[in-house]
């Protein structure tokens, strides 16, 4: 009986992580496709503008994930405890706060896009392109946020395949529409941002078919919104926001430092590295989001052995994937960079090739940090998850980037990410050991 349960858990782990890795890669892939077509149509200036606007996109996506993962985690735990009314209340509160915050983003896009672009320190030469991209992203915030929230609930409701299908269809639509809007119609950054929003809308439409066909177990209910419940959702999901937001903050800081060291060409080179890393981080996020419903369910039903096994499976998978990814990036870094260097700028090529070899060392540790953070979140221990997310997102990497850039120039900048992720991995392991000893 025990072996049967373990086999079932391993099968579910393989199913959920496979679907979510594929789905998250597809979701992040449209940023990479944008990078390719923007480099094709607008060269290094377009890449630099995209890199200045990406932090706003990360913040919008992160907010949607915060509410989605926070609410879906509560939903999964409550459902495993056979409390359907409270599970539906979690969904209702999640949708309420998601819509409210999305409206705020729309207002910012309508009236404050110039101010935000100036705050991001975008140079005059690329100011208008940067402003255009981030404004469209903000106007599409309700679509991005509802899509991310609904994907989390569908995944926690036992339909990871549908979540993967929705993200994959959105990504493929993005590829086709990017060519039409950027290359054929020549709509530039406006077209790139518009395509990203439309693609998310297609994904949201597919996810909503799950609800329209009444296959879901989550429903909106008529009940007064609870500020306490919303705080619980935000607290549980905050590490996901910090993880996404941190990538945006890091991009801003790196942009400022690299702009001072190497100018716009350096920022464009970093844009290539940062956007490629989105795919790798998507793999880790896919594993984390795939295992989250299973850990939450095991935790809610008191199956502590199942929780430990799921964490062990994740660690083994992470080690294998991280090693493979770094080997591939190290060997073929020149070919990868060349894809996005349409102008054949030799300085950009050289900067990016060196950077990618150093920067991606951090991916060997980042995966563990992302998964251990979602583990704490899934077991209703948000504080250690907050610590991990804040350390890797703000507290260590920002001062590390400034210090190492002073000591080693651009090599120091590239080294900041792996140094930070290694330090956080050590601290995360200590937090895990402490929690295990307490049990």
Image: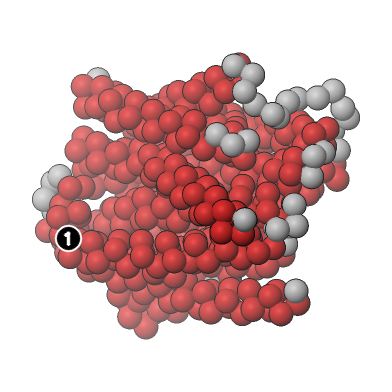
The residue lying toward the viewer, choosing from 102 and 87, is 87
What residue is drawn where x is 49% and y is 61%? 314
Q: Does residue 329 lie above or below 79 as drawn?
A: below
Q: How is the image coloured?
A: secondary structure
What residue is drawn where x is 43% and y is 76%? 419
Q: Is residue 10 left or right of residue 339?
A: right
Q: Where residue 415 sits in the image (x, y, percent)? A: 36, 74
The residue lying toward the viewer, choosing from 238 and 373, is 373
The residue lying toward the viewer, choosing from 147 and 48, is 147
Q: Does residue 268 lie above or below 222 as drawn?
A: below
What residue is drawn where x is 44% and y is 66%? 316
Residue farthest along the bottom direction in this orientation:
407
Could you tell me if residue 148 is visible in this image?
Answer: no
Q: Where residue 371 sits in the image (x, y, percent)? A: 54, 61
Q: Where residue 185 sits in the image (x, y, percent)? A: 25, 20
Q: Which residue is mark 1?
A: 332
Q: Does residue 44 lie above or below 408 as drawn?
A: above
Element at label 1: loop
Quarter the N terminus occupies: bottom right
């Amino acid at each position: 009986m025990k072996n049967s349960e373990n086999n079932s858990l391993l099968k579910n782990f393989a199913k959920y992580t496979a679907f979510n890795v594929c789905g998250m890669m597809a979701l992040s892939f449209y940023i990479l496709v944008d990078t390719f077509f923007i480099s094709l149509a607008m060269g290094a200036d377009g890449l630099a503008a995209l890199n200045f606007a990406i932090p706003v996109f990360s913040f919008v996506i992160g907010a949607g994930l915060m509410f989605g993962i926070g609410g879906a985690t509560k939903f999964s735990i409550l459902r495993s405890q056979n409390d359907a009314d409270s599970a539906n209340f979690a969904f209702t509160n999640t949708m309420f706060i998601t819509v409210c915050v999305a409206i705020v983003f729309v207002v910012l896009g309508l009236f404050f896009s110039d101010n935000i672009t100036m705050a991001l320190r975008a140079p005059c030469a690329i100011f208008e392109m940067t402003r255009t991209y981030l404004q469209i992203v903000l106007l599409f915030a309700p679509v991005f946020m509802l899509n991310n929230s609904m994907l989390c609930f569908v995944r926690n409701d036992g339909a990871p395949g549908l979540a993967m299908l929705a993200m994959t269809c959105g990504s493929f639509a993005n590829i086709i529409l990017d060519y039409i809007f950027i290359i054929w119609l020549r709509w530039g950054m406006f077209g790139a941002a518009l395509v990203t929003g439309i693609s998310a809308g297609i994904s949201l439409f597919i996810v909503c078919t799950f609800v329209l066909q009444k296959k879901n177990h989550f429903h909106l209910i008529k009940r007064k919104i609870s500020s306490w419940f919303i705080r619980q959702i935000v607290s549980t999901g905050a590490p996901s926001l910090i993880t996404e937001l941190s990538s945006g903050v890091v991009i801003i800081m790196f942009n400022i430092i690299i702009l001072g060291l190497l100018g716009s060409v350096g920022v464009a080179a970093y844009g290539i590295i940062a956007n490629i890393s989105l795919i790798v981080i998507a793999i880790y996020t896919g594993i984390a989001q795939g295992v989250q419903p299973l850990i939450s369910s095991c935790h809610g039903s008191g199956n502590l052995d199942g929780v430990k096994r799921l964490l062990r499976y994740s660690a083994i998978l992470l080690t294998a994937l991280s090693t493979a990814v770094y080997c591939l990036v190290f060997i073929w870094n020149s070919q990868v960079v060349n894809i996005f260097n349409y102008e054949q700028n030799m300085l950009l090529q050289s900067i990016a090739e060196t950077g990618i070899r150093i920067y991606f060392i951090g991916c060997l540790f980042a995966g563990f940090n992302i998964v251990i953070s979602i583990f704490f979140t899934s077991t209703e221990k948000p504080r250690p998850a907050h610590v991990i997310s804040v350390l890797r997102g703000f507290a260590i990497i920002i001062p590390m980037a400034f210090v190492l850039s002073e000591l080693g120039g651009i090599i120091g900048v590239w080294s900041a990410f792996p140094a930070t992720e290694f330090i956080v991995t050590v601290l995360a392991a200590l937090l895990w050991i402490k929690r295990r000893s307490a049990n």
